[in-house]
Amino acid sequence: MLVWTVTALVLLGGFMVAFGAPYVPTRPRELRRAFGELYSVKPTDCLVDIGSGDGVVLRAFIRLGGRRAVGYEINPVLVFVSKIISRHHPAIEIHLANFWRAEFPADTTVVYVFGDSRDIRRIQRKVQAEASRLGRPLHLISYGFQLADQKPIKQRGAHFLYTVTPLQGKKAQV
């Protein structure tokens, strides 16, 4: 039994390295700073968390007054854990999905991401494609990594706030 568990964890870890950022939980204090000092959550806001892990960002956003929080996570174990922990929050949705292929909800206003240096440019293009599809700017909070060609509006600790505007007259490429 122990051999199967260790093998499953190793395979799952390899899967995560190949397809996305590793699971790194965000501390509640850092989230209060991100959603307090960096971006003030409004009761009309809908958050999309790219790589939502155990859902800590989703729950913090709802507790701070957000209307809706949607998480996309590719790791089935983390989706299960997140759904169990978040089960008392009806405003939270967690999807076992590859966010590269997912469309953000029509009411999305804020996108939260812990990316890594290899994916941050692609994440920026994804958010811009969604802003273009939705026809309005989206706020992007990046934890740990700055966008290469855009200066943040604000920075608090390792969090960076950007406004990602729709592309004019052409479709964004992810």
Image: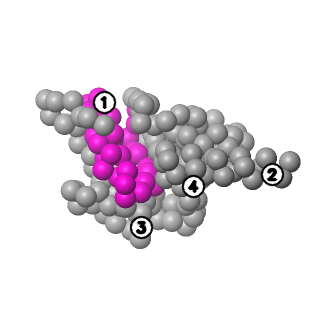
**Residue 158 disc label:** 3
Mark 2 sits on what residue? 3
Question: Which percent across, then down, holds residue 75?
Answer: 60, 43
SS under mark 1 = helix
Q: Residue at x 55, y 41 (%)?
A: 73
**Do labels 2 and 1 touch, CB within 8 Å?**
no
Q: Quadrant of residue 145?
A: bottom left
Task: Give the CA separation, mark 4 to mark 3.
Answer: 16 Å
Question: In front: 138, or 100?
Answer: 100
Say which label, 3 or 1, has the lower sequence index: 1
Mark 4 sits on what residue? 23
Q: Is residue 45 visible?
A: yes
Say which label, 4 or 3, has the lower sequence index: 4
Say which label, 2 or 4, has the lower sequence index: 2
Residue type at the position of mark 4: Tyr
**Residue 134 disc label:** 1
